[in-house]
């Protein structure tokens, strides 16, 4: 899948009411919000162990694979229910969270 195709799929998930699943090589089953996407980068706000604090990351699309996560459903009440949500598989380790 090219970067343009990845960006097209990811842009549909830019919604503060929706979450996506993210997996790094060393961290799995993370919840995140897609805050932006260009043809080169995807911007994510990852949930952390501290309530109301998120880790802001920009990840090159060349390090991201796009898939579907059938173990979660969408939650925006204004949108039709979908039985799966976006899964981003990131090559590499999760950056350390700085509080």
Image: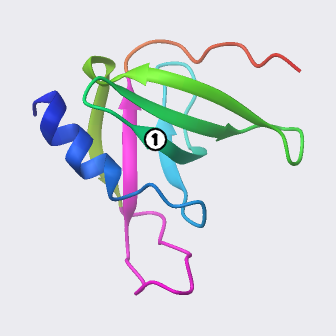
**How far across and down, in percent of the image, does residue 77 sit?**
57, 86
Instruction: Locate residue 8 relative to residue 48 in the image: left or right.
Output: left
**How far across and down, in percent of the image, does residue 90 sit?**
40, 25
Q: Residue furthest left?
A: 1
Which residue is painted at 33% across and 59% down in the image?
Answer: 12
12 shown above or below 38:
below
Judge by depth and name the residue closer to the eye, 24 or 44.
Answer: 44
Which residue is painted at 58% across and 45% down in the image?
Answer: 32
The prevailing secondary structure element of the residues shown in magenta is loop
Residue on which the image places disc 1: 36
Residue 86 within the magenta-colored segment of the rendering: yes
Instruction: Locate residue 52 relative to residue 1 in the image: left or right.
Output: right
**How far across and down, in percent of the image, does residue 47 sit?**
71, 42
Q: Which residues are magenta?
A: 70-90
> Quadrant of residue 57 in the image?
top right
Quadrant showing the C terminus:
top right
**How far across and down, in percent of the image, does residue 66 sit?**
27, 41
Which residue is painted at 27% across and 47% down in the image?
Answer: 67
Callout 1: SS: strand
36 shown above or below 62:
below
Quadrant showing the N terminus:
top left
Badge 1, how many Cα within 10 Å: few under 14, some, many 20+? some
Which residue is painted at 44% across and 12% down in the image?
Answer: 92
């Amino acid at each position: 899948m090219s970067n343009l195709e990845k960006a097209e799929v990811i842009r549909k998930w830019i919604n503060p009411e929706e979450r996506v699943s993210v997996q790094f090589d060393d961290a799995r089953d993370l919840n995140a919000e897609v805050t932006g996407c260009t043809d080169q980068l995807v911007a994510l706000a990852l949930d952390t162990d501290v309530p109301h604090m998120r880790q802001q990351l920009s990840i090159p699309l060349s390090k991201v694979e796009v898939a579907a996560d059938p173990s979660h459903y969408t939650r925006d009440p204004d949108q039709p229910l979908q039985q799966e949500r976006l899964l981003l598989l990131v090559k590499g380790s999760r950056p350390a969270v700085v509080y």
